[in-house]
Image (tube, rainbow, N blue to C red):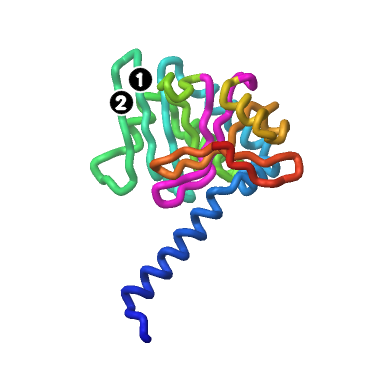
């Protein structure tokens, strides 16, 4: 019995999608990258918070050396701007204007992202999702999903307490770091225990 080209393509696609899913849906890769680049990731967090003007929030993601998406919102001045690389109607200069960053500051932020082996950083003002009490560091995007770190100002945050109760290694908890996979429709908090084994907390 022969298999049609269409069926073969679907099978290959499903196998590839499952491989990507299993690779992302694992706290160990996130944990290894954090351990290897801990100093650089925390330095990126500190720099991003330092250069963010009060009352202004932003989300920056790179694709290699290129800016993929970049958004900024000023609550005080009621301003918002977004850059999307595939949309020629948008300009990276608009979010920069709201943030008040010059080329040197923006270049330094991008250099710190590369040094930390991550692709983006976000500080946003939505209190329902942590607001200004956390910094999101994007590790990787894949399709509709992605893996990232959420670094909380307070290590006693409810999310981090849940990690500790689940048996997650304290070395992340003490830095206020949660390991997260976002599948688009679902968000899962992950970590590794002291033996390096993966834990999907929920």
Q: CA distance from mark 2 to mark 1?
A: 6 Å
Q: Quadrant of the N terminus?
A: bottom left
Residue at 67% over, 29% down: 164
Between 150 and 181, the one lying in front of the other is 181
SS at circle 1: strand
Q: Position of residue 61 (x, y in %)?
A: 44, 41
Indicate the quadrant where residue 82 lies: top left
Residue at 47% over, 34% down: 106
Image-based side of 97 in relation to 174, left or right? left
Task: Identify the mark nearer the N-term, 2 or 1.
Answer: 1
Residue at 65% over, 46% down: 198
Q: Is residue 145 above or below residue 101?
A: below
Which residue extends farthest front? Answer: 1
Q: According to the image, label 2 marks what residue?
A: 80
Write down the region rendered in magenta. Answer: 133-156
Image-based side of 35 in relation to 146, left or right? right
Q: Would you say the magenta stretch is mainly helix, strand or loop?
A: strand
Q: Position of residue 66 (x, y in %)?
A: 43, 47
Are circles 2 and 1 on residues that touch, CB within 8 Å?
yes
Q: Is residue 36 visible?
A: yes
Q: Is residue 112 visible?
A: no
Q: Which class describes the residues within 10 Å of circle 2: few (<14), some (14-19), or many (20+)?
A: some
Magenta stretch: includes residue 148? yes
Q: Position of residue 81 (x, y in %)?
A: 31, 30
Indicate the quadrant where residue 39 lies: top right
Which residue extends farthest bottom? Answer: 1
SS at circle 2: strand
Which residue extends farthest left? Answer: 89
Q: According to the image, label 1 marks what residue?
A: 74
Q: Position of residue 52 (x, y in %)?
A: 48, 22
Between 28 and 141, the one lying in front of the other is 28
- Specify the label residue 113 is tagged with: none
């Amino acid at each position: 019995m022969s298999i049609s080209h269409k069926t073969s393509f679907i099978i290959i696609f499903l196998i590839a999608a499952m491989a990507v899913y299993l690779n992302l849906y694992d706290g160990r890769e996130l944990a290894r990258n954090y351990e290897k680049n801990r100093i650089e990731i925390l330095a990126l967090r500190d720099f991003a918070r330092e250069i963010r003007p009060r009352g202004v929030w932003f989300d920056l993601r790179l694709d290699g050396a290129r800016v993929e998406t970049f958004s900024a919102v000023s609550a005080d001045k009621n301003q918002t701007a977004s850059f999307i690389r595939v949309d020629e109607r948008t300009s990276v200069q608009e979010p920069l204007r709201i943030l008040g960053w010059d080329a040197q500051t923006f270049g330094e932020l991008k250099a710190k992202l590369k040094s930390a082996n991550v692709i983006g950083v976000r500080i946003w003002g939505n209190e329902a999702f942590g607001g200004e009490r956390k910094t999101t560091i994007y590790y990787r995007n894949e399709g509709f999903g992605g893996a990232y770190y959420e670094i909380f100002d307070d290590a006693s945050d409810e999310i981090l307490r849940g990690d500790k109760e689940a048996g997650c290694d304290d070395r992340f908890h003490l830095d206020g770091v949660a390991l997260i996979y976002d599948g688009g429709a679902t968000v899962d908090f992950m970590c590794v225990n002291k033996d390096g084994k993966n834990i999907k907390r929920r």
